[in-house]
């Protein structure tokens, strides 16, 4: 990628994001230093360092990539508790951060001055090395890469295995085998390789690399050569230019091993598209304009404000009509209102649709990942994708990349048995992994299903205790289905050894944190020996939902319509008939089902001042469970704009660790409704 | 820090810096009242000051006692801290003089409910003395005492007020 050609938009976005992340890391480091940090602090720093690495690699800022790579290395040791955080380590952290900031400033000012990252990297290496010396060599030796000085034609011939891989690539692409010789003195060869691959992904698909796990290989065993096979519709000039943007490259050798043709697109054999268009790779011919995302976000916010005002206006219109029934001006107002409502909802829908992206934006990256992974794990996996055309808000889609990546990785790495084992169990030797997305009312449901060995709750229990995540007594109170959710806890891994495949495991905890952030829900269904299914349910959009407003004392609550099954009004004397107490738990008799009762007022600790002669019961569905919410008064349905208050909720945050509220919504009169968080309530009810 | 301030590529950074320096030399503080005492917050931390006339404070269930609720500030959700309750001073009805001082901390806006806001004051460095030992121990968010003639003004470190573990608080600030 040519730095001068860089799109200013991306450039600005990169700077903005990186700046935020550097600042956030600094805050977290401070917390860590004060000794208040927990594992979540380190996890969060790690995640941010990781995304700085990725972003800077994409933009081609090698210094930043290399430094954040090392920082990440150090962090992973700290997280694994191999390295204790002492003053020296903290100082190094801060120093690296300062250097990152300096690089950032340099980029921002577009200055060309050199920033020395060597010394700080040495310092990091020194800490890690000191640690390493104390223990046995942790990494297995890599096979030596080709050592011959002269590159022979033979080196560019495909091996049997590679040939087999290329067979699977669509015939319309050219395939090149590329051998890159790095400068002998080049440092950070693995990062260089990472950069090369990252850049090339912009123009084609990398089929394989040698060494395959180049990111993990240290300089000493890397050698000077890096080989890769790329499928692309560009010519060799482009590839050459692309690779040459990376510094310290001595030679690039290239051979075209397949001439691309315009034949029908054929997908790799192990990827099967179910439903949707078969040629998902083809671009649409619509005329499009590229717009700054911030503008769309602003537009969306304005629409949100407009919707609030619109609701307010409707209220005033209705009030006026009651008061001045025959006033012609009031009648005029009430004639205009329906049109405003219509324009409002059209506007909202249109703006929202500009933010919608089909799932294929992220789904497309997975087939290759799954294949590589399966190969490395020596497993046979059929990967199926369904519903790539399903659209969802772009804010949501971005947050989905990490969770889905980790669930899929986990499925391939830990979920499937080896072929032998599968045969022995009478299963098809190749496992089936299925990723699907579909709309369900106002939600998007994503499922990842494997037919592997399932999650062993017993092993999970052992692991929880071993890792000190909980005590045996506490676990005894949990059912198997509940215990399984511990796999989403930071620091949890059931693999006997941490394999390099699950990465350094910014693990499944990212699933919980990201999905939670999106107001989504994750469910796991697993059956030992049969397989596991992850079900992620997400709102279609983050911003606006239809909700039922509830009054309880002086508080107003909002409950998203999508989760409501039925509302029932009970008169005073009907209550004892319908609500029963079993073993201290109240249940409501709903269509011959005993549904647990939650008294909303009680739940939120609201003083009950009135003797009620009637009340309302709202039957709410949450994943497969149902609850009966008892509320004081219903105030009708309306569209609400969700505002997060997550910044203030949690341990040591301003509001403390309050549960049961997922956000607030501004009402027409400028006051708020509290949005009821069914996920939290369900958890508290033992779900 | 000038939050939300977009530095244009290139030279914005330096400009930002010089502003900061200027602020430090001048030592300007906004003075507000709680009970009979005067308190002051560094002016650069203050985003705006609002009357309560047009603001509805919505209560949030199950939050700590000193959280008065949340307000809607032009579409943004801003939590309100009742400083009287936070400092363990007997609460009192919101009056005409009551103000909400909006401060911006770590990119987040937070409102402080105070009895009244009077004026902006500049302190020379010689007019600021460290807080007496008793106060230092009990109440870490008092960073100094500003003196103007006979008047004494408690200088508050607003970030520290928000640290939750400080909930034990001082009971009264007898002068």
Image (spheres, coloured by chain):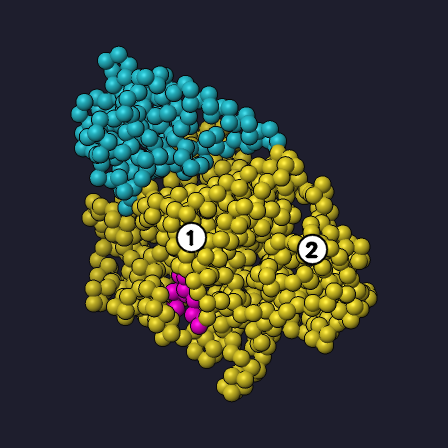
Chain colours: A yellow, B cyan
The chain carrying label 2 is A
Relative to A406, does residue B111 appear above or below in the rendering?
above
Same-chain check, marks 1 and 2: yes
Relative to A90, does residue A488 appear above or below in the rendering?
below
SS state under label 1: helix
Query: Label 2: few (<14), some or many (≥20) within 10 Å?
Result: some
In the foreground, B23 or A614 = B23
In the foreground, A554 or A365 = A365
In the picture of the structure, the residue carrying the numbered disc 2 is: A183
Q: CA distance from mark 1 to mark 2?
A: 35 Å
In what quadrant of the picture does the C terminus of chain A appear?
Answer: bottom left
- Of labels 1 and 2, the one closer to you: 2
The answer to whether residue A551 is left or right of residue A435 is left
In the foreground, A413 or A357 = A413
In the picture of the structure, the residue carrying the numbered disc 1 is: A42
Question: First in sequence: mark 1 or mark 2?
Answer: 1
Q: Residue furthest top?
A: B149
In the foreground, A269 or A314 = A269
The answer to whether residue A470 is left or right of residue A251 is left
Q: Residue at x 25, y 46 (%)?
A: A606
SS state under label 2: loop
Residue A483, which numbered label? Answer: none
The chain carrying label 1 is A
Q: What is the x, y in percent for residue A358?
A: 61, 56
The answer to whether any part of residue A601 appears in the image is no
Q: What is the x, y in percent for residue A291?
A: 65, 41
Query: Label 1: few (<14), some or many (≥20) within 10 Å?
Result: some
Quarter of the image where one finds residue A669: top left
Please report the bounds of the magenta region as a residue range.
A483-496
């Amino acid at each position: 990628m040519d730095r001068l050609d860089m799109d200013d938009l991306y450039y600005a976005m990169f700077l903005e994001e990186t700046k935020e992340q550097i600042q956030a890391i600094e805050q977290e480091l401070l917390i860590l230093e004060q000794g208040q940090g927990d594992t979540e602090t380190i996890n969060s720093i790690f995640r941010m360092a990781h995304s700085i690495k990725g972003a800077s690699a994409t933009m081609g800022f090698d210094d930043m990539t290399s430094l954040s790579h090392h920082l990440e290395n150090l962090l992973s040791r700290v997280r694994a508790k191999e390295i204790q955080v002492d003053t020296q380590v903290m100082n190094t952290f801060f120093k690296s951060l300062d250097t990152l900031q300096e690089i950032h400033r340099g980029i921002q000012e577009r200055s060309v001055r050199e920033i020395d990252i060597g010394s700080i990297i040495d310092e990091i290496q020194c800490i890690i090395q000191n640690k390493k010396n104390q223990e046995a060599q942790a990494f297995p030796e890599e096979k030596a890469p080709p050592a011959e000085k002269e590159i022979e034609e033979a080196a560019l011939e495909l091996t049997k295995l590679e040939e087999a891989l290329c067979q699977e690539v669509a015939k319309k692409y050219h395939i090149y085998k590329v051998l890159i010789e790095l400068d002998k003195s080049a440092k950070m060869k693995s990062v260089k390789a990472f950069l090369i691959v990252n850049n090339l992904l912009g123009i084609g698909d990398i089929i394989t690399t040698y060494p395959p796990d180049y990111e993990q290989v240290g300089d000493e065993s890397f050698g000077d050569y890096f080989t890769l096979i790329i499928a692309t519709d560009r010519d060799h000039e482009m590839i050459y230019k692309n690779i040459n943007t990376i510094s310290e490259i001595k030679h690039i050798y290239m051979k075209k091993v397949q001439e691309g043709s315009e034949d029908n697109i054929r997908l790799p054999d192990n990827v099967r598209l179910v439903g949707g268009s078969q040629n998902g790779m083809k671009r649409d011919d619509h005329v499009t304009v590229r717009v700054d995302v911030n503008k769309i976000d602003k537009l969306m916010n304005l629409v949100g404000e407009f919707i609030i005002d619109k609701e307010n206006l409707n209220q005033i219109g209705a009030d006026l009509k009651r008061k001045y029934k025959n006033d012609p001006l009031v009648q005029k107002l009430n004639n205009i209102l329906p049109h405003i409502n219509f324009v409002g909802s059209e506007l909202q829908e249109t703006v929202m649709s500009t933010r919608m992206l089909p799932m294929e934006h992220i789904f497309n990256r997975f087939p290759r990942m799954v294949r590589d992974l399966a190969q490395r794990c020596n497993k046979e996996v059929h990967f199926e994708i369904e519903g790539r055309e399903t659209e969802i808000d772009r804010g949501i889609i971005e947050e989905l990349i990490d969770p889905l990546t980790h669930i899929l990785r986990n499925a391939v790495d830990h979920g499937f048995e080896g072929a032998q084992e599968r045969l022995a169990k009478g299963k098809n030797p190749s496992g089936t992994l299925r990723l699907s997305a579909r709309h369900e009312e106002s939600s998007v449901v994503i499922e990842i299903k494997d037919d592997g060995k399932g999650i062993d709750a017993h092993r999970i229990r052992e692991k929880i205790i071993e890792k000190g995540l909980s005590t045996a007594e506490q676990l005894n109170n949990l059912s198997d289905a509940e215990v399984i959710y511990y796999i989403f806890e930071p620091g949890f891994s059931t693999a006997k050894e941490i394999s390099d495949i699950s990465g350094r495991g910014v693990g499944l905890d990212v699933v919980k944190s990201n999905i939670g952030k999106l107001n989504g829900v994750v469910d796991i269904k697993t059956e030992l020996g049969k397989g596991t299914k992850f079900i992620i349910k997400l709102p279609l959009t983050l911003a606006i939902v239809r909700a039922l407003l509830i009054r309880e004392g002086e508080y107003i609550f909002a409950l998203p319509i999508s989760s409501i099954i039925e509302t029932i009004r009970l008169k005073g004397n009907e209550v004892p008939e319908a609500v029963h107490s079993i073993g201290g738990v109240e249940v409501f008799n709903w269509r011959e089902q005993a549904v647990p009762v939650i008294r909303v007022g009680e739940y939120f600790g609201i003083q009950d001042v009135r003797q009620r002669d009637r009340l309302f019961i709202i039957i709410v569905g949450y994943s497969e469970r149902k609850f009966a919410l008892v509320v004081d008064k219903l105030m009708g349905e309306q569209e609400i704009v969700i505002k997060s208050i997550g910044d203030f909720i949690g341990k040591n945050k301003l509001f403390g660790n309050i549960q049961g509220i997922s956000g607030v919504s501004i009402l027409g009169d400028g006051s708020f409704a509290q949005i009821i968080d069914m996920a939290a309530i369900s958890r508290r009810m033992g779900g | 820090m000038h939050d939300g301030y977009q530095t244009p590529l290139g030279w914005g950074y330096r400009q930002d810096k010089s502003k900061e320096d200027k602020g430090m030399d001048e030592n300007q503080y906004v003075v507000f009242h709680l009970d009979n005492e005067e308190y002051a917050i560094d002016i650069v931390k203050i985003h705006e000051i609002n009357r309560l006339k047009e603001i509805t404070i919505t209560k949030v269930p199950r939050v700590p006692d000193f959280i008065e609720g949340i307000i809607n500030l032009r579409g943004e959700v801003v939590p309100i801290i009742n400083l009287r309750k936070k400092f363990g001073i007997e609460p009192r009805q919101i009056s005409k003089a009551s103000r909400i001082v909006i401060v911006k901390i770590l990119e987040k806006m937070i409102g402080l409910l105070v009895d009244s806001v009077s004026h902006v004051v500049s302190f020379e460095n010689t007019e600021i003395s460290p807080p007496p030992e008793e106060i230092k121990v009990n109440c870490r968010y008092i960073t100094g005492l500003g003196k103007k003639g006979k008047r004494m003004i408690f200088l508050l470190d607003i970030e520290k007020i928000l640290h939750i573990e400080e909930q034990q608080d001082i009971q009264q600030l007898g002068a």
